Image: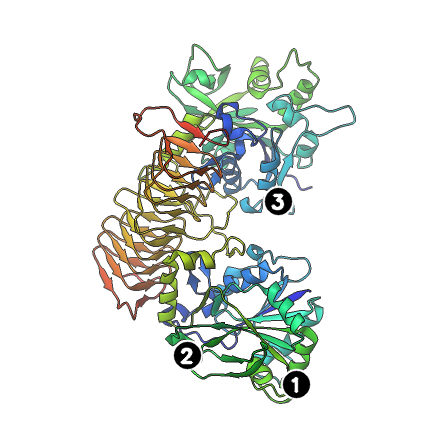
Amino acid sequence: MKKKEMIAMLLAGGQGKRLKGLTKSLAKPAVYFGGTYRIIDFPLSNCTNSGIDTVGVLTQYEPLVLHSYIGVGSDWDMDRKNGGVFVLPPHEREDGSSWYRGTADAISRNLKFIDQYDPEHLLVLSGDHVYKMDYTKLLDYHKEKGADCTISVINVTLEEAPSFGMINTHEDLKIYEFDEKPKQPKSTLASMGVYIFKWDVLRKYLVEDIDTPDSESAHDFGKDIVPKMLADNLSLYAYPFQGYWRDVGTIPSLWEANMDLLNDAPELNLNDPNWRIYTRNPNEPAQYISPQAKLKNCMVNEGCSVYGEVDRSVLFYGVEVGEGSVITESVIMPEVKIGKNVRIHRAIVDQGKVIPDGTVIGADRGDDSEIILVNGDTPY
Amino acid sequence: MKLMGVINLDHELDQLKELTYFRAGAAVPFAGRYRLIDFALSNMMSAGVQDIALFVRRKYRSLLDHLGEGRPWDLDRKRGGLFVLPPDWNDPTDISSGDLQHMHNNRDFFDRSSGEYVVHAGSQHLSKVDFCDLAEQHKASGADVTVVYKHVDLLEPEHDACFRVDVDENGFVNGIHNEKGHHNLYIELFIMEKGLFMQQMEYCIAHGDSYFFRDAILRNPSGLKIAGYEYKGYHAVINSVESYYKNSLELLDQEKYKQLFSPEMPVHTKIKYEAPTKYLEGADVKNSLVANGCLIAGEVEGSVLFRGVKVEKGAKIINSIIMQKCVIEAGAIVENVIMDKDVQLSENRTLVGDSRKPYVIAKRSIL
């Protein structure tokens, strides 16, 4: 196998418990976002656009949809002779088998995969975030600093900080502490779950970690590997990322990130021909907008037919909105059929749901009311 | 029953003015995100046809670009698949002419395919014919050839160029001609056993003929038994600017749209990775078909917008067809217009065509 300067490992095994019903039979990276995408399209497209052609996707929780979605990777231009995208679920080995015990363990169990390409650097990504990022800039920075590890960080507010892995650095952005979900945050730099490691350095830590008993290690990058590297005085740097980045791990944050797209000039520009977000195209015909329909401040995908009113909402492919229905501040997932005279306000309606005529969901509530999730478990 | 397909563009005239100056009629964009060829290809795909030859003679650059190796139609196969066959023929003993040249010079395609029956189609008639059903009826009837026709109640100008089919009470054809008042339109689709097809081709070449359908089937010198297959679904003929415009806008009728895009027989096309369309503040879109990647802040009514069209604030598009990546700047008004790809219409301009004779704007114009 030809040597590669850098390959990527994409952690896509998480359940995303806080997305409740949406991840019942779906891994979090496969959750829909932005009218046509799944979350994993963002890191995969970033890889392709950054010229990274070899990506291992580590799956574990409910992988069926994810596996068939990724396929041979042709949608992201990753059907390559040398390299490409590889789905890597946990597997049985001579010395027994177990699930991936943590983020670092998932990589440790696939040393053979990585070693084939003999990379100098390893890019570790998470399949949970929505952002556009040029990883070549991160690699340039990593090389310039001569770092053993570079962690991409984003500025958050002190109020948000306790829900992130916070990075404490010296003035030159050299990291001295990794603070996982701190109660008293010391900085506003949150880890984006995007790391570059020198592969030979990381490899040693992984080999050591794999034999560490579970009582002493959670086999996690944030909790174990990075703190150990810091304790050993390795050179770790923070890379300040500028741009839109969102953790869409909860129903409100998923909803909000969808709403962010509806601004006239959204921070996350999905129409940039130089940085396309690739996705599996459902091949639906052009959307039909009826003479009675009213649409504004919304995003609508192909295969939709709209007879009602849609305002500040995102409609995925194949959605029908019946006559007299009014959809506001909502996210309607693929192939949802909404009958006539339905009122939906501040809701996420899961894929394939059929909403009967006259149903009222979340209407007459204030603009700060909770986001309702409508899925297979909801009565209507 | 294994089928093989031929899409023969040789006798198709490129009469869509600016739209076909530089592209074959088969490559003309249609219905917001397709090209005319997609419909014939998708019908073949639905019937599981995996060996398809496309006979093209000229202006095929955009067709090649669109078709690639045929992946959207599942035609990127190890065996068979899509063969786009432009004319590069160097056989000094070749005495064939017309579309028989394609057949003679691409004998290998027919010889190598394991298909038993040849389904022969064009690109100007849009239909949803079920080729499996056609093949079954063909076999059951014992006919040598089965031609597909559509009974059209209301004849339109674009039907003038079509052949007509006389069918007897047993479903056999006793005449094919061009009598303009006749309502059974031949929709440029026939099926024939491969061996017989090849034999007829040899016969035509030997007799100096130049048009397989006319010389082997219509004139029928060998006394072939010809059956008629009546097709009753969606049908449109696109062979002029007027018929293109009319049939495009007729898709705003949901009945027609649902017939053409029935989920049982999906239409496939080259994939573009556009974001969903955005309706901005000030958007007022009514009775229209809109593809992905558009940014709409103006008014659109009774129109078809292709992928990536920008309609700025205060712009107005009425009864028009706006192709890929056109920009209609603020305050501009467009009515009864067919705008080819990448046209830019600057602020406050007005472009109005006649509803019977839409105004066609050539690709990449700046107005």
Q: Is residue A314 above or below residue A203?
A: below
Circle 3 residue: A72
Q: Residues within 10 Å of mark 3 (few under 14, many from 20)?
A: some
- Describe residue A5's horizontal placement relative to residue B79 as left or right: left
| Marks 1 and 2, the one that precedes in the sequence | 2
Mark 3 lies on a secondary structure that is loop
Mark 1 lies on a secondary structure that is helix
The amino acid pointed to by label 3 is: Val
Q: Quadrant of residue B255?
A: bottom left
Q: Residues within 10 Å of mark 2 (few under 14, many from 20)?
A: some
Question: Along the line of sight, which residue is nearer the eye, A86 or A355?
Answer: A355
- Describe residue A272's horizontal placement relative to residue B188 as left or right: left
Question: Along the line of sight, which residue is nearer the eye, B188 or B26?
Answer: B188
Where is residue B140? Give x, y as percent: 66, 70
Q: In this rendering, does residue B286 appear at all?
A: yes
Question: Along the line of sight, which residue is nearer the eye, B12 or B237?
Answer: B237
The mark found on residue A248 in the picture is: none
Circle 1 residue: B203
Q: What scheme was used to colour the molecule? A: rainbow
